[in-house]
Image (cartoon, rainbow, N blue to C red):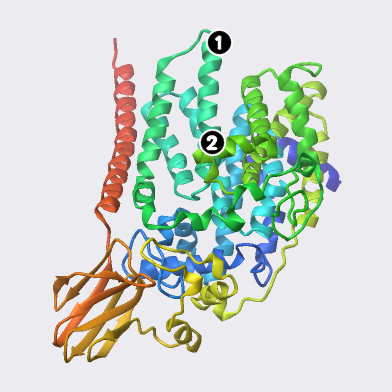
Amino acid sequence: MMFSRIRHLLMVWPRQRVGGLALALLLTIPALLPLAAPGYFFNAHDGHHSVFWLYEFDVALRDGTLWPVWAPDHVLGFGYPLWLVYTPLAFFVAEAFHLLGLGMTTAVKTAWAFWFLVGAAGIYRLARRWWGPTPAVIAALAYTYAPYHLVDIYVRAAYAEFAALAIAPWALLGVVHVWENPRPRSAALAALPIAALLLTHSASPAVFLPLIAGLAVWKSAQAMLARAFRLRPATWTAIAFALGIGLALIFWLPALLERHYILEADWRRGTYDYTRHFVYPGQFFSTFWGYGFSVPGPGDGMSFGLGLIPWLIGGVGALAALGLGRSRLEECRAEALFLVVASLVALLAMTPLAAPAWRVIPLIASVQFPWRFLAVSTIGLALLAGAGVRWLENQAGAATPFPLVLALLIVLASFPYLQPQLTPIRPEDENALAIVEFEAKYPDMRGTTSFAQRRPEEATSPLIAQYLAGEPLRRAEIVEGEGEVLEQHAAANTAFARVRSYSDVRLRFYTNYFPGWQATMDGRPVEITADPPDGLIGLTLPPGEHMVRLRFTATPVRRLGQALSLIAAALIIGLIAWDRLRTVRHGRSEAEPA
């Protein structure tokens, strides 16, 4: 009786208007159940980052910055322009849950669950458009329980990358929708997931943009071959990309034009050297699961497998698309062929055979780890799994119980991968002490600006003892001349000091100098410079009692990026309104009697 009900649920419910999506999301729950367990996977690769970066984001936001750039507690407490390097959108989502009253770690765990559901819903919507409701449920499950998808959360704890993986299907869906409905509203809405992808994870655009743009090019080529090419869909697709990029300029314009103030070599050497992280073909089929790291050669401590079931059912979809089965896919065969090509290109890009391309294409090197292209293969195989189910439905009829068996196998086969290494949550895991502990353990992971004359692992900081003692940070200190700091206070983007000087004095703030920092003395602007050897903020004060205020502000480049993003947002709203107005007018004209 129970088997019959489950079978009815999987085979009938998806055909209802919202039943399929509800079922896909319901079957996603086992994948995120570990998030409901006590503790957190702090031993995962970026486990601590996913929480203490939210802490940094939160303190910056509470200090009056609506688009944070400066993380005050990094680099020995000297601060670092973290959000000029890492895109912040995913942390807005986690911060929203925190502002609703959840603790730091609980907010992050809730955000993980949110992205689980967003990704599954995106794959479902796209697969349903191409293959139908039941195949869409299987595609969503193949995506949710794909090994790399679970590696990203429970082994790597790569929060922003996990979010980008959830957004990518929506960007693909946006391109499909524009192509099928070339109109202003379609382009405006398609721009949103493209912008979200650009603003979620810094390395993901190099991974996903070729896939998304490739789909648009593929559909154009398909139309040309069918002698049915129309300029209108291509034009509105290009507009969607332009608006999406424009909306993301709030981050990318400063990131590109001010990146020379950051020593990017920090994020290209050692652990981040792509030559150490190629994947060997046999690893794609391996069932190995580990919590270690990627290392040179095939002896990695983490999984790069794509999963046996996705390989099998996705292979059926690929063969059907290629016309090698007993019959071809009747609809959307071109899309299935695109997925085959995209998945194969992604697999090749991860192997040592692609090393020459990594050397000569600058953009691809920003990915850092070749195995990040597993994200493309994960999406491709999940959608191809939907194509495989559609082909099997065509062969055996819609009443076949095969989808039920397949759904259960996908969920059950993933259980060994749903056991993160949970540890208790300490109070210090949710504040700046977590950063101090991490940088003490991994001094080579401290960032560097171009204003420092020595590497941060060679520096010392009086702030460390203050962090450990739980004291308010005393960032201001007189390093030359006679005087005293009578009063001081520091926050994420601001600092204040009341100083009494008996001669000309050099006041130093234990904060890294970086464009955007501005100071006033007694309400008047005063020049600040980068003091050697660590590039900390310094200024000279004359004799007397002075009020010195320091604030991190937007540079002209950052203001330009903000303005361009606001213009893009206004254009998106304008296109939606224009489309709505045209629809209303068209409806009125049809309603008028002849």
434 lies above or below 49: below
Dot 1 falls on a residue whose secondary structure is helix
Residue 460 at x, y = what percent?
Answer: 46, 79
Residue 48 visible in image? yes
> Label 2: which residue?
360
The reply, left or right, for residue 493 in relation to residue 344 is left
Residue 65 at x, y = what percent?
Answer: 32, 64
Residue type at numbered disc 1 = Leu
Residue type at numbered disc 2 = Val
- State the residue at coordinates (43%, 61%): 82
- State the residue at coordinates (26%, 69%): 529
453 lies above or below 482: above
Towards the viewer: 363 or 122? 363
Dot 2 falls on a residue whose secondary structure is helix
145 lies above or below 52: above
Residue 336 at x, y = what percent?
Answer: 66, 25
82 lies above or below 328: below
- Mark 1 vs 2, N-terminal side: 1
Towards the viewer: 222 or 536? 536
